[in-house]
Image: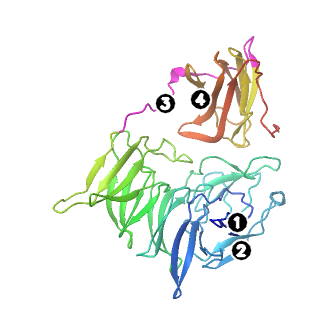
């Protein structure tokens, strides 16, 4: 967290929640400002939930913790990771589990803060187990913070000494689900005590925003359920299930307003087949407003937008080809490696109409399957099936005659691998195989 003077832009203070982040424990959730009532004092406070599940409450005037934060010793091996010897641990109660409950066959778990190494290790919190970008809320009535906390979702980490990835570790891009019961958590934390007042467990990691109105708190689930809870007790008072076609999951952030004397809560429903880390969500797109019942009404008014159906974008089998075993005569061969969940190179250039034989090699150190799709003027085409670690094959295509940029990417089932995207630039005088900046293939 960083504070700057609003009028001058000058630095005021900062507070670091994670030292030398090797686990993707960044802090995308927006901060919350409120007046903390604690030990008979009222203090202007700022609160923030980190992706590791810790909740920090500071004096927003100077950044000093209002709940004690200790620097606790943590593992530092392997030495080449240069891991911090300590990490900040607040006295507030953790929002999500902080250890692996059980692992799948062949997996080994490790305590939180263990630096990733060559041998894959399963850890909780994982890279996306905790609070993400969705906003939390605070109620001055209950003095509770309401947090879309993520949930229990262990991830497998490993690292390679010479890797130039941005994290200092390599994620499998999906959680370690084998023999693991993953679930989501929606938390209410009592800011006057630093303890959880109540917690709601749901099937999938909580990723929606939260809002409070009066004595109600609203949040959604990726499966399309939209909840109204008692803000004090956490009792589930009302649930709307978006079962309509093209509505989607309740993944947005709700808002409340009054129009013509009627109170409304509006929710953005949408999503894709993946909401980060392989979490399923019905595809769709709709904005739905709900009105509190008026006098004499027995049920909630529901006003539903009429979404226009959008093609799903599914790629038919007829557009996919089996990977070739060798480059055909007359084709220019280009090598593309899959390594550390990235394409190398991720930028190719070609002349208009040039015949290409893109040699795809899966060089992942663990058995992560990959494939290759590319969007051309004639439509999307790609490799049928996947290439397992250590496998290779050729994608044969002819560059478009029209100059421009054409994207390629990797999908496996419902997963779109973040980082595995690239561009084929078609231009007169182009030459295939522009190297990836700053990267040499091991």
Q: Residue at x 54, y 77 (%)?
A: 194
Residue 173 higher or lower than 152, as above or below: above
x and y percentages locating residue 201 in the rendered image: 45, 62
Question: Quick one: label 3 or label 1, which is nearer the N terminus?
Answer: 1
Cα–Cα gap, marks 2 and 1: 31 Å
x and y percentages locating residue 164 in the rendered image: 79, 46
Q: Is residue 142 left or right of residue 240?
A: right
Categorize mark 1 by other alpha carbons within 10 Å: few (<14), some (14-19), many (20+). Answer: few
Q: Which mark is residue 385?
A: 4
Cα–Cα gap, marks 2 and 4: 47 Å
Is 312 colored magenta in this rendering?
yes
Read off the residue under disc 2. 72
Of the two numbered discs 2 and 1 in the rendering, the one whose residue sits closer to the viewer: 1
Read off the residue under disc 3. 314
Of the two numbered discs 4 and 1 in the rendering, the one whose residue sits closer to the viewer: 1
Categorize mark 4 by other alpha carbons within 10 Å: few (<14), some (14-19), many (20+). Answer: some
Cα–Cα gap, marks 3 and 1: 50 Å
Of the two numbered discs 3 and 4 in the rendering, the one whose residue sits closer to the viewer: 3
Please identify the dominant SS of the magenta region: loop
Read off the residue under disc 1. 10
| Quadrant including the N terminus | bottom right
Stretch in magenta: 307-332
Q: Look at the numbered discs 2 and 1 and tell me whether their residues touch, using CB distance below 8 Å.
A: no
| Quadrant including the C terminus | top right
Question: Quick one: label 2 or label 1, which is nearer the N terminus?
Answer: 1
Visible in this render: residue 1?
Answer: no
């Amino acid at each position: 967290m960083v504070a700057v003077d609003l009028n001058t832009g000058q630095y005021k203070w900062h507070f670091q929640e994670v030292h030398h982040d090797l686990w993707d424990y960044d802090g995308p959730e927006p901060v919350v400002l409120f007046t903390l009532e604690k030990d008979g004092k009222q203090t202007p406070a700022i609160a923030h939930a980190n992706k590791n599940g810790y909740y920090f409450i500071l004096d927003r005037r100077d950044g000093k913790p209002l709940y004690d934060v200790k620097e606790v010793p943590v593992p530092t091996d392997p030495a080449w990771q240069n891991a911090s010897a300590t990490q900040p641990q607040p006295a507030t109660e953790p929002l999500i589990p902080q250890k692996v409950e059980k692992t799948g066959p062949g997996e080994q778990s490790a305590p939180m803060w263990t630096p990733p190494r060559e041998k894959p290790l399963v850890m909780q919190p994982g890279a996306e187990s905790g609070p993400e970008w969705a906003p939390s809320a605070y109620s001055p009535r209950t003095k509770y913070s309401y947090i879309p906390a993520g949930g229990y979702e262990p991830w497998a980490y490993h690292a390679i000494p010479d890797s130039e990835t941005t994290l200092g570790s390599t994620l499998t891009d999906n959680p370690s689900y084998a023999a693991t019961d993953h679930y989501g958590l929606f938390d209410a934390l009592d800011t006057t005590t630093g303890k959880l007042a109540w917690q709601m467990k749901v099937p999938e990691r909580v990723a929606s925003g939260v809002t409070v109105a009066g004595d109600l708190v609203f949040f959604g689930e990726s499966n399309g359920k939209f909840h109204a809870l008692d803000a004090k007790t956490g009792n589930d008072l009302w649930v709307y299930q978006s079962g309509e076609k093209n509505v989607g999951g309740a993944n947005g952030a709700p808002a409340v307003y009054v129009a013509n004397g009627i109170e409304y809560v509006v929710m953005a429903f949408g999503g894709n087949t993946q909401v980060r880390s392989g979490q399923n969500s019905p595809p769709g797109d709709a904005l739905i407003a709900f009105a509190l019942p008026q006098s004499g009404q027995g049920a909630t008014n529901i006003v539903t937008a009429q979404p226009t159906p959008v093609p799903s974008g599914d790629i038919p089998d007829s557009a996919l080809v089996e990977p070739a075993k060798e480059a055909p005569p007359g084709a220019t061969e280009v090598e593309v490696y899959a390594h550390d969940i990235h394409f190398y190179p991720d930028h190719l250039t070609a002349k208009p109409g040039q015949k290409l034989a893109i040699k795809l090699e899966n060089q992942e150190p663990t058995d992560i399957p990959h494939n290759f799709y590319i969007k051309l003027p004639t439509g999307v085409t790609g490799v049928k099936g996947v290439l397992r670690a250590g496998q290779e094959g050729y994608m044969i295509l002819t560059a478009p005659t029209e100059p421009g940029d054409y994207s390629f990417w990797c999908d496996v089932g419902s997963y779109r691998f973040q980082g595995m995207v690239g561009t084929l630039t078609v231009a007169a005088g182009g030459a295939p195989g522009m190297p990836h900046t700053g990267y040499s293939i091991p």
